[in-house]
Structure formats: structure tokens, C-alpha cells
Amino acid sequence: MVGSEVRDVLERIASAVEDRDVIIRLDVFLLLYFGWMGFTVLYDLIRTHSRDVTAQLLRLPFTSRSFVVTSIKVVREVPGLYQFLHGVYYIGFTGSIALTVFFILFYWRDLGSADELAVRYLLAYMTCGITYSLFHVYAPHYVYHLQMFSPDRTYLTQQEFVLPSLHNTIAAVNILTLWKHRKKLWGVLLIGLNTLVPFATILLAQHWVYDALAGILLAVTIGEVTEGHQIRVHESVRRIHVSKLQMATVLGFVAGAYLLLLAITTPKP
């Protein structure tokens, strides 16, 4: 039984990588991810013009040091919970994107949902990028000097990228896009993983409660305006031989893996 399921997955992947429409859309997702990673690097030049509004946020309920420290303490006291949420937090951005794209695009070959997902990611990146450029809020663990991760300030976990939470925006976008597959096993598992993201970001002091709520609200708004969106592929792109598209995809994955490794391990000054 297991062998037949593995064989089915491999056959689906083998068929998908020969499909021009699938490869083109996968390259779109790679370009979107590269665009966001590029913004995180350029942000060092932008953030001097971004207004710090952390003090205003700290006037709201559920932002006190005692609330944040108590949340972390509760998580650490439950055996295995801290490690589990830590894993969810790191999987919850790049990992959830990769898994959602894989199942929608390769496993289920749902091109309509893939088109919606791509434009939703684009709008999420653009909205959050513009917001962070105009004003920013620092993460709870940064404000209260709590050592959570090491290193705790990398190009992937920027402490100013807080409100709205892109982590939670992406998670909610994934759930909205996966919802039509909620009766399938992998659909249930992926929706469950993304549902855990807000809890991980808040309980690990990476985000304030308001960051998660703002991210979810942003995702719902984006979902409403992108319902039924389709990607229009220019004829000149369709004329490119599928083998060249595949080569571009492979190079994109290699470059993406390298950039992700640097983003995770390189401390910011």
C-alpha cells in the first residue's frame, strides 16, 4: 500500500515536470520569493526612513512584559511544546510556501488555485513591504531583550517585520487557497500546519497578538479581491522549449536554497 502511494506521487511529479503550464507557474513562485528576499536585503537602506511606532503599540493590552514572559514560560513548561512550536515557526514561512505550492501545483495540478495563490503572495509581499518601509514595530522578544533563537537577528527573521505579520498573512493565504482541498488528507494536514502558525509566532514572542490579527485580516482582504484570478502567460513565453524552462527552474531552486541558507544563518549588524 505504501509502495503504491509513493509510486503514485512520483508519477504525478514526473508528469508535472513535463507540463509547460506547471513549470511556468513554478518559476513565477520562485521569482516572487526572490523578490521578497531582495527586499529584505535592501531594507537596510530603507529602514532609516521608516517610523518606529512600537511605543504606540505598547499602550495596548496584551503587550506587557509580564504577558510576553508568562506566555514563553507556559510554553517551556510543557514537555516538547517549545521545540514543536519552534519547528512550526521556521516551517511556517518558507516551508509552508513550498509545501502549499508543491501540493497545489504538482500533486493536485490545480492551476486555478496556483494562479490565485501566486497573486495573493504578490499582494502580501507588496503590502507588507510598503508598510514596513513607512513604519515599523519591533518584535516582543527584541523589545524586552529575551534571547529566543540564535542568532536572533537574521535576514530571515527581521525584528522590524512585525506589523502586519507576513508569517501569519502567508499562513492565512495558504489556508484560504487550500480550503477547496480540505477533504483530502494532505489538505487537512497543510491547513492544520498553517493554523498553528499564529500560535507559534505569538507564544514564542516573535509577534504581538495584533500582528497576527492584522496579518489574518490582510490575507482575508487579499483573498476576496483575488478570487478567480488567472495568470495570463505571454505567447513568447509559451514558445520557450520546456527543457529550457526546466533548466531555469533547477537553477532557481539552487539559488533559492543558497539564499535561504544565508538568510537563516547570517546575523544582521
Image (cartoon, helix red, strand yellow):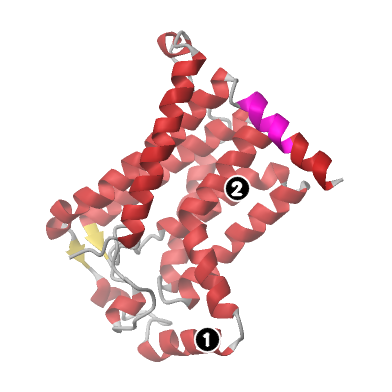
The label shown at residue 76 is: 1
Residue 93 relative to residue 192: left or right: left
Quadrant holding the C terminus:
bottom left
Q: Residues within 10 Å of mark 1 (few under 14, many from 20)?
A: some
Residue found at x 58% / y 31%:
228
Q: Which residues are magenta?
A: 9-16
Where residue 108 sits in the image (x, y, percent)?
Answer: 69, 34
Name above or below for residue 124 compared with residue 25: below
Real-space Cα separation, disc 1 to disc 2, in angstroms: 31 Å
Q: Quadrant of residue 181?
A: top right
Residue identified by numbered label 2: 176
Q: Label 1 is placed on what type of residue? A: Arg
Residues under numbered marks 1 and 2 in contact, where contact means CB atoms less than 8 Å apart:
no
Residue found at x 53% / y 38%:
117
Secondary structure at numbered mark 1? helix
Give the label, 1 or 2, closer to the camera.
1
**Nearest to the observer: residue 161 or residue 264:** 264
